[in-house]
Image (spheres, helix red, strand yellow):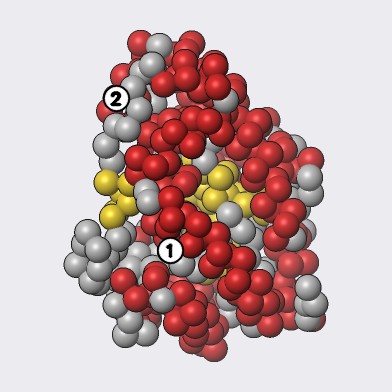
Amino acid sequence: MMTNTVYDEKVKKYKSIVKFENTSVGTAYGGPATPAHHKGILMKDYITDTKRGFQAYIEYINEINEIAPIDFLNTPYPGMMNVILTTMWLSKVKIPGRELPDDALWQIDEKAVIDRDDYDFVIQNGYEAFRAKVLPKVIDMAEVEKFFKYIGEEGPSQSKAFIDNGFPLVSEIATAPPFEILSGARSMPKFFMDCYKVMDKIKEAQDVIQPTVVANAIGMLKNANAIGAWVGGWRGASGLVSPKIWDTLVWPYMKGMADAMLENGFIPVFHLDQNWDRDIERFLEMPAKSCVLNTDGMTDLKRARKLLGDHVAFMGDVPAPLLSTASADKVSDYVKQLIDNVGIKGTIITSGCDAPANAKFENMVAMIKTAADYK
C-alpha cells in the first residue's frame, strides 16, 4: 500500500523512540469509544454502522490533530467490538441496542462456559477444536462470519485512511496470551481458583494453546503489513496474581508472544492494565530497545524508569478519571510531571489504557498538546 512523507516520518519517529534515539516526546491517540459522544452518534450505531462509525473515528482524531499534533494511533476503530472481544476472550459481550441501552458501552458478560475437565479437552484435541467448541456458546457464529466479511471489505480502506491522514497504527491487533483466554472462558473467580488447585494441568493446556495463538497473530500481522501489536496483560497483572502463578502461567507466554513478534519484524506493545510494580524488572529479559510498555496509570513509571533505564520504551499513562472529570490544566500538569519523571527519550504520551467514552475533548487536546510542547 502506498504511503506518504508524513506517515513515513512518523513511523521513523516511532522506531526512534523504541530505540531511545528520539529528540522529542511522541504522542499517541488511544480511545476506541471516545469519538461517539463528541460526534453525536449513539454507541449502538457507532460500532454497528461501521462506515459511519469509522468516519466519526477518523474525524475526531483529526479534530484533535488540528490543535495538537498526534504522532501515532494505539487503537483501531472498534467496529463490531463484541466479536473482537468475544473471539479474544471466549466470553459473551453485551452490546448497546441489543442487551444494553442504545448509548451504553459494550460490556463483558462473564460466566463460566467451560469446566475444569475442559483443560484435558484442550490437551487432547488442540486449541482450534477447543475454540470451535466454546465459541458457539458465547456468540452467534453468523455474527463472526459477518465480522470477517466486514474486515475483508472495509479493512483495506480503513488502513488506507490511516495512511492518507498520516497516522501510523502501532498496535494493529490485540493478542491475548493463553492465561487470558482460559480466564475468560472459565470466568475469573473459577480460573484463579483452578490456578491453585490444578496449576500443572493449566500449564499443560497453555502449552498446547500458545503455538496456535502465536501463529495466528503473526499471520494477521503479516497480512496487514503491520508495525506491531498489543501483547495483552490484564488479569495476569502482578497486582492480581501470586508470584508463582505469574512466573508459571503468565510471563513465559507473554514473553514468548513478544519474542515471536520480534523474530518476525514486529514491535510488541505490552499492554499492561492494573499494577505491574512487583515484576517490572522482568522486562529486562526482553532484548534492549525493542519493545514498548503501555501502562494504565496504576504502575509506578518513575520507579519503572529507574529500574529499566533505557531498556524498554514507555507509552502512557494519563489515567481515565483525569480525562473524564478533571480540568484541562490538571491533565496538563499530570503530563508535565510524567515527562519529568520518565524523561523525553523512549517516551510516548497517551491515555492510560483506552481513553474513556466520556473523556472531555479539551482534556484529550491538553494531553497531546502538552506532550508536544513540553521541553
Q: In the drawing, does residue 261 fall left or right of residue 63?
A: right
Q: Position of residue 66 (x, y in %)?
A: 54, 88
Asked if residue 242 can be seen in this view, the reply is yes
Image point (44%, 33%), residue name: 133
Q: How many marks?
A: 2
Crowd around label 2: few <14 · some 14–19 · many ≥20 (10 Å): some
Residue type, numbered disc 2: Lys
Q: In the displayed structure, does residue 294 sit left or right of residue 191?
A: right
For label 1, the residue is 80
- The quarter of the image holding the N terminus is bottom right
**Among numbered discs 1 and 2, the one appearing first in the sequence:** 1
Question: In the rendered image, which residue does mark 2 sit on?
Answer: 190
- Within 10 Å of the Cα at label 1, are there few (<14), some (14-19), or many (20+) other Cα atoms? many
Tag 1's secondary structure? Answer: loop
Note whether 73 is above or below 188 in the view shown.
below
Q: Residue at x 43, y 56 (%)?
A: 142
Tell me what residue is drawn at x 53 percent, y 67 percent: 150
Front residue of 35/144: it is 144
Spatial distance from mark 1 to mark 2, Cα to Cα?
28 Å
Tell me the quarter of the image containing the C terminus.
Answer: bottom right
Q: Which sits in the foreground, 176 or 125? A: 125
Whether 248 is drawn above or below 48: the answer is above
Q: Which amino acid is tagged 1?
A: Met
Q: Where is residue 157 in the image (x, y as percent from the top left)?
A: 63, 77
Which is closer to the viewer, label 1 or label 2?
Answer: 1
Classify residue 73 by image quadrant: bottom right
Under circle 2, the secondary element is helix
**Mark number displayed over residue 233:** none
Give residue 18's position: percent from left, percent from top: 71, 54
**Taking the image as drawn, is residue 9 in sight?**
no
Furthest residue toward left: 101
